[in-house]
């Protein structure tokens, strides 16, 4: 019996777990703050940083096991998949699509996170939910009526059923237990988008939502009953006290805060979490600079100009 048990244990595969980020030099500060919050929350999982494009990010020292990847670290199959998705989704920034390289990396189970996120718990504890699911996330995207993923939400429900919007997901933070069928399912989701070009919005998050709805991957959203975790969108909270109230008074766990592309202006107390890694002196300087930009009106320009440039780039890519 002992020999048989030993052989069974040897045959049991030890799953490799880790975290993927996508970053470049421009997003280094946010990436460093994210890594800082991950480590301060007690998570010691290895972190692999996929290059977004442009100049590579710097890697913070004393951050545990953090590895900056290059495109050559991925298989020919993975690079071919990425090239195909980039070619068929020219409206989407190629850097955003690189998150799908996580399906071709070293980890059997992985957590993917955008940089504009602050960890509020040990993310290692989230992986236990993957025992019965292939995707685990915590967000309230399903309450938005599909307006961020779809150009025609009502048509989407007509095609895929009245509950099709319930599988909406924020692609900026999720866990995945990889399956051999996932890549083909993603390509099938892309083919569906091509067959119904006016229904989806053409970006990476829409592709993930549509794939989940078509392929029916076993999925858990911790913000839904019976778990009822707190909303992870930073815009839901006016200040840090709101977060304490939700956790301590209302008793809702929260895994992270997602700023969804927002820039810390210093005018909202919740923004200070984006400066967590800084010393008190550096934090005061950043907050003072942010406040000056806000009062002068410069911050509004800083927000509008990148959006206008991104919109123009999307139009140019779609015309190729």
Image: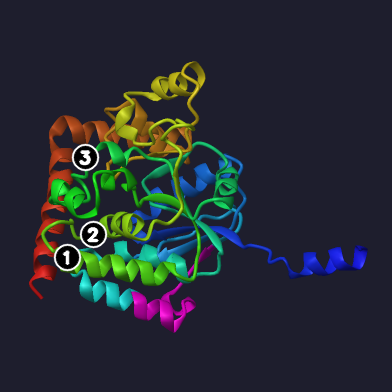
- What residue is disc 2 on? 203
In the image, farthest residue toward the right: 2
**Mark 2: few, some, or many residues within 10 Å (few <14, many ≥20)?**
some
Residue 54 visible in the displayed image: no
Up-down: is 174 above or below 264?
below
289 or 176, which is in the foreground? 176
Q: Are marks 1 and 2 in contact (CB under 8 Å)?
A: yes
45 or 281, which is in the foreground? 45
- Mark-to-mark CA distance, 1 and 3: 22 Å
Sequence order check: which comes first, mark 2 or mark 3?
A: 3
Q: Position of residue 248 (x, y in %)?
A: 51, 19
Please tell me whether residue 73 belongs to the stretch shown in magenta: yes
- What residue is disc 3 on? 145
Sequence order check: which comes first, mark 1 or mark 2?
A: 1
Q: Residue at x 35, y 56 (%)?
A: 212
Sequence order check: which comes first, mark 1 or mark 3?
A: 1
**Mark 3: few, some, or many residues within 10 Å (few <14, many ≥20)?**
some
Query: Magenta segment, which residues?
Result: 67-81
């Amino acid at each position: 019996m002992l020999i048989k048990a030993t052989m069974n244990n040897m045959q049991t595969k030890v799953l490799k777990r880790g975290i993927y980020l996508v970053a470049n030099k421009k997003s280094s500060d946010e990436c460093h703050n994210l890594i800082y919050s991950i480590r301060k929350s007690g998570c010691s999982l290895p972190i692999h940083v996929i290059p977004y494009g442009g100049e590579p990010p710097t890697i913070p020292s004393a951050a545990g096991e953090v590895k900056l990847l290059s495109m050559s670290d991925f298989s020919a199959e993975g690079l071919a998949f990425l090239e195909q998705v980039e070619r068929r989704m020219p409206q989407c920034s190629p850097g955003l699509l690189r998150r799908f390289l996580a399906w071709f990396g070293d980890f059997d189970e992985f957590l993917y996170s955008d940089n504009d996120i602050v960890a509020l718990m040990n993310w290692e504890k989230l992986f236990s939910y993957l025992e019965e699911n292939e995707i685990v996330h915590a967000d309230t995207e399903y309450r938005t009526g599909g307006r961020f993923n779809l150009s025609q939400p009502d048509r989407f429900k007509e095609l895929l059923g009245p509950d099709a919007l319930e599988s909406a997901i924020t692609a900026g933070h999720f866990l995945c237990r990889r399956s051999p069928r996932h890549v083909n399912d993603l390509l099938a989701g892309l083919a569906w988008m091509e067959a119904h070009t006016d229904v989806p919005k053409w970006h990476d998050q829409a592709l993930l939502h549509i794939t989940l709805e078509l392929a029916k991957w076993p999925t858990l959203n911790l913000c839904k009953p019976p778990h009822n975790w707190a909303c992870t969108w930073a815009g839901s909270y006016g200040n840090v006290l709101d977060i304490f109230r939700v956790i301590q008074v209302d008793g809702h766990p929260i895994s992270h805060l997602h700023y969804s592309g927002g820039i810390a202006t210093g005018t909202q107390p919740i923004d200070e979490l984006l400066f967590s890694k800084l010393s008190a002196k550096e934090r005061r300087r950043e907050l003072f600079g942010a406040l000056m930009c806000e009062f002068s009106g410069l911050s509004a320009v800083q927000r509008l100009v990148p959006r206008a440039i991104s919109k123009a780039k999307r139009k140019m890519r779609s015309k190729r």
